[in-house]
Amino acid sequence: MTVGWSRFALRFAQYYQSLTTTDLWTPPRLRNREWMFIPWGGRAVDRHRGFASHSQLLGYLQQRGPHSCFHSTAYYRNPNERTMNEKGWLGADLIFDLDGDHLPGVSDADFPTMIEKIQEQAWSLWSDFLEPEFGISREHSQFSFSGHRGFHIHVRDSALMGLDSNARREIVSYIRGEGLEVDAVLTGGDSGWQSRIEVGKQSVVEKLQLISEGKTESKQLLDEFQGLLNERGNSKGKNIGRNRIKNLADLVTSEDRLNRLNDDHNLSVFGKETSIFWDLVRKDSSVVLGTAGETDENVTVDVKRVIRWIGSLHGKCGLRVTEIPFERLDPDGNNPFDPLMESIALKGGKSSNIELIRDDVTARINGVEVSGGTGDVFEVEDAMATFLCLKGWGEVTT
């Protein structure tokens, strides 16, 4: 009987064994991509791999059945070489990684809600920034669910392929609104950020008023705002406490202050809390982009990054990294993509009893929801069992 991780390693192996070469999607210029694989059981990462064909890649997958699969966002002259100098960097795709783990006030313990929020961010990134302001075209873009907590946007435009890290960092800084001077934006010519600031101002005012009124969502809003103000890279270098946000919320209830704010945004109508107000407006109107590992370096900036391969299984939850048709990216569209229904590859198999080993978690897979805490036992299908166990939320029990 397979136990522990070996049970799931077997299911991953069965998935890869079921594939044919026609099932495989590979990134453009396959011969110029480096591949990296994480094996099961904590063994060393296998990287500096290169494949010349679908059949070579499939052979590796069916022989190894890896925990996780990645390919380089960069193109290399010699992807099999072990040092970057020997590889010969030729350029890189422009990658945008949106990870729900970085959303202020949102926890992946409520997995369906986190996915909903990060999907909204993915659509905002495209519809508010990439297409209208950077002129990035759909024909050069590919959209995917990461298989776990987020979404990826791959931009493959030859005009952008040679951008260095500094140029990519400028794109990220603009999207995040870093260094944005609200006064300059509101008094300047028409721009995307000008309209975002105007809309964001009203949104923040409404949220602060809910906090002041003590509405049921006030705690969540406080968590969200505190997370926004104290995220990594906070320019003020200070930790903003909840009491200051509550104080600002009380000040926002004054109609006279709001009228003066609308008449002249330069006025310090909220006293010492005015700077916090504008910081919230800026950050509430931006998009949260994922970081590369434990550093503050953004995934977009890293020109030698690897990204999860579309079609592979995610070793931390068992869902498939899945391409999303553009017309289904908008979560409020007519037929939005549902990753918790459409990224399930491990279907079938017998049901299992899973005992939760973490408190206050919620998962939804294939329309079935599990919500509970430590000690609760659920009989679930294979996809949910895999998800709960690989997440570290549950264990198989007899």
Image (tube, helix red, strand yellow):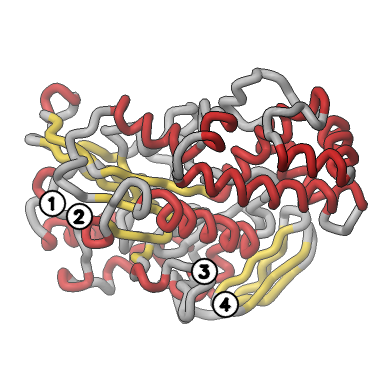
Mark 1 vs mark 4: in front: 1
Callout 4: SS: loop
- Is residue 5 at least partly visible in the picture? no
First-in-chain label (2 vs 3): 2
What is the spatial separation of the Cα atoms under label 3 and label 4, in whole angstroms? 27 Å
**Relative to the observer, which residue lies in front, 29 or 301?**
301
Locate residue 244 relative to residue 267 in the image: left or right: right
Disc number placed over residue 331 in the picture, else none: 3
First-in-chain label (1 vs 3): 1
Mark 4 in CB contact with mark 2 (< 8 angstroms) = no
Q: Residues within 10 Å of mark 2 (few under 14, many from 20)?
A: some
First-in-chain label (3 vs 4): 3
Mark 1 in CB contact with mark 2 (< 8 angstroms) = yes
Residue 303's place in the image compared with 384, above or below, is above
Residue in the image at 12% along x and 57% along y: 56
- Percent coordinates x, y for residue 84 in the rendering: 19, 25
Locate residue 43 relative to residue 272 in the image: left or right: left
What is the spatial separation of the Cα atoms under label 4 and label 2, in whole angstroms? 33 Å
Disc number placed over residue 27 in the picture, else none: 2
Disc number placed over residue 30 in the picture, else none: 1
Identify which amino acid the numbered label 3 is placed on. Answer: Pro
Locate residue 60 relative to residue 368 in the image: left or right: left
Disc number placed over residue 153 in the picture, else none: none
Query: Circle 4 sits on which residue?
Result: 381
First-in-chain label (4 vs 2): 2
Callout 2: SS: loop
Identify which amino acid the numbered label 4 is placed on. Answer: Glu
